């Protein structure tokens, strides 16, 4: 199978999942009787958590990892860009650029695609 076709199929299944859950939890949302809150796309949450932690620890430096976790509230209290900028003696604009760079590195890394394939496997 050619790589373009494979990525196209994965992208289609990803978009279908997004469409299905677009309004979940709203008045117009889809109520799913069989929703399992202990799993994420069929994978046990503890496995997903381990894979995400391994991904972040493998890609990012210690400082980048800490800032990203604080920004999203992963394992700690969520902090705003302003709070992160103050605690790191930086400006808000510089912190935003720094966070965008971190997220871009994660998006472009090969292990991120492996995690995505694991979560959205058929």
Image: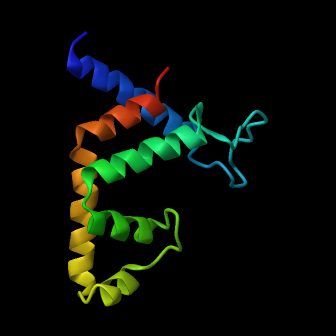
Q: Residue at x 43, y 47 (%)?
A: 52
16 or 52: which is nearer to us? 52
- In this rendering, is residue 53 above or below 6? below
| Residue 24 on image: x %, y % | 65, 48
Q: Is residue 5 above or below residue 26?
A: above
Left of 75 or right of it: where is 109? left
Give the quarter of the image for residue 116: top left
Where residue 84 appears, x then y in whole percent?
Answer: 36, 81
| Display colour scheme | rainbow
Q: Residue at x 68, y 42 (%)?
A: 38
Relative to 100, is 80 above or below?
below
> Could you tell whether 21 is left or right of 114 in the image?
right
Total numbered labels placed on residues in the image: 0
**Residue 5 x/y as whole percent:** 27, 18
Q: To which quarter of the image does residue 65 belong?
A: bottom left
Left or right of residue 47: residue 57: left
Query: Looking at the picture, how far across and down is residue 36, in whole percent?
Result: 71, 38
Kindly identify the residue that appears in the image at 42 percent across and 79 percent down.
Answer: 80
């Amino acid at each position: 199978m050619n790589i373009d076709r494979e990525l196209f199929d994965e992208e289609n299944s990803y978009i279908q999942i997004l469409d299905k859950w677009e309004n979940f939890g709203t008045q117009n949302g889809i109520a799913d009787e069989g929703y399992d809150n202990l799993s994420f796309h069929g994978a046990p949450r503890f496995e997903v958590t381990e894979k995400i932690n391994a991904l972040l620890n493998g890609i990012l430096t210690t400082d980048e990892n800490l800032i990203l976790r604080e920004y999203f509230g992963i394992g700690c209290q969520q902090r705003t860009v302003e709070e992160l900028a103050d605690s790191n003696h930086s400006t808000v604009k510089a912190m935003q650029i720094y966070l965008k760079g971190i997220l871009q590195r994660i998006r472009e890394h090969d292990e991120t695609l492996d995690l995505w394939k694991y979560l959205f496997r058929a």
